[in-house]
Amino acid sequence: MPSLLKVTGLTRDYGGTPALAGVTLSLERGGVLGLLGPNGAGKTTCLQVLSGNLAPSAGRVEVCGIDLVRHPIKAKRHLGYLPERPPLYPDMRVDEYLALCARLHRVPSRQVPAAVRRVKARCALNEVGRRLLAKLSRGYRQRVGLAQAIIHEPELVILDEPTEGLDPEQIREVRLLIRELAVHCGVILSSHILPEVQAVCTQVLILRNGRAVHQ
């Protein structure tokens, strides 16, 4: 059975300047991989490439044995992604937005209402389903971002600094959710806070200036 994620020699250049240089990593089902490093280390660039939102300059990314560059649509069906800024539409209500995300992720139409109910319960959103996204607090917007990333129950979940800007209670809830997700899938998250990584990760990759300095 192929690894959930296998990355070999991953490189990404911007105008000849490497943001990533030869990063290699792997992740199995049930694992939580933390990308740790200071701001500017290449964490967000790495996650954008792994999610298929940014093309690599060199190297290979395989998701469930599928080459992400050669077969992007097929590979992305196994992915859920929360970028640094959640991709929200402020004029939509939470329920409407999550239903849209379910359809974009090709959840069958008859299963969309159940998927929305399920993900709202997991992300503690039951009380805000009818509220406009523009009216939500930052903590609730982050929860909605998490919900859209997992509504189709992906095998690999990619989270870019998922607890950024949250209060201590919200951070605790997100950590519990990550542990719950890892029972059934693999999770990659980025952070520049060591205790954050220590709290939830089973393995760590430390980046500095786009290079892996320790794993």
Image: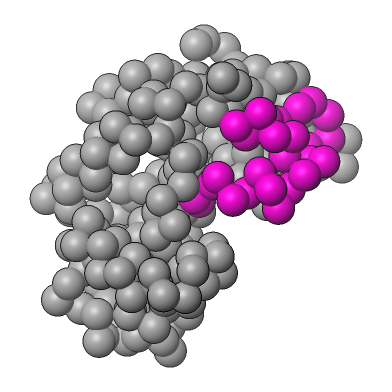
Residue at the image point whose x is 46% and y is 47% from the top: 154
Considering only vertical position in the picture, is 60 above or below 156?
A: above
Above or below, 148 against 113 in this view is above
Answer left or right for 139 relative to 80. Answer: left
Out of 141 and 39, give the one closest to the viewer.
141
Relative horizontal placement of residue 3, taking residue 28 as reference (left or right): right
- In this view of the protein, which residue sits in the foreground, 25 or 181? 181
Numbered disc total: 0
Residue at the location (36% across, 48% down)?
162
Q: Quadrant of residue 9?
A: top right
Q: Is 166 placed above or below 86 here?
A: above
Residue 14 found in image quarter = top right
Using the image, determine if residue 31 lies above or below residue 42: above
Residue at the image point whose x is 63% and y is 39% from the top: 50
- Tell me where the magenta segment starts and ends, as one range: 54-81
Question: Does the segment drawn in magenta span residue 27?
Answer: no
Q: Position of residue 134 (x, y in %)?
A: 36, 83
Q: Residue at x 47, y 28 (%)?
A: 35
Which is nearer the eye, 61 or 201?
A: 61
In the displayed orientation, state which residue is furthest to the left: 169
Residue 188 locus on image (x, y percent) = 45, 34
Q: Which residue is situated farthest in the top direction here?
A: 214
Q: Position of residue 67 (x, y in %)?
A: 74, 34
Residue 207 seen in the current view: no
Question: Left or right: where does residue 199 sit relative to residue 17?
Answer: left
Q: In the rendered image, which quarter contains the N terminus?
A: top right
Q: Give yes or no for residue 80 being in the magenta stretch.
A: yes
- Res. 156 in view: yes
Q: Position of residue 93 (x, y in %)?
A: 35, 85
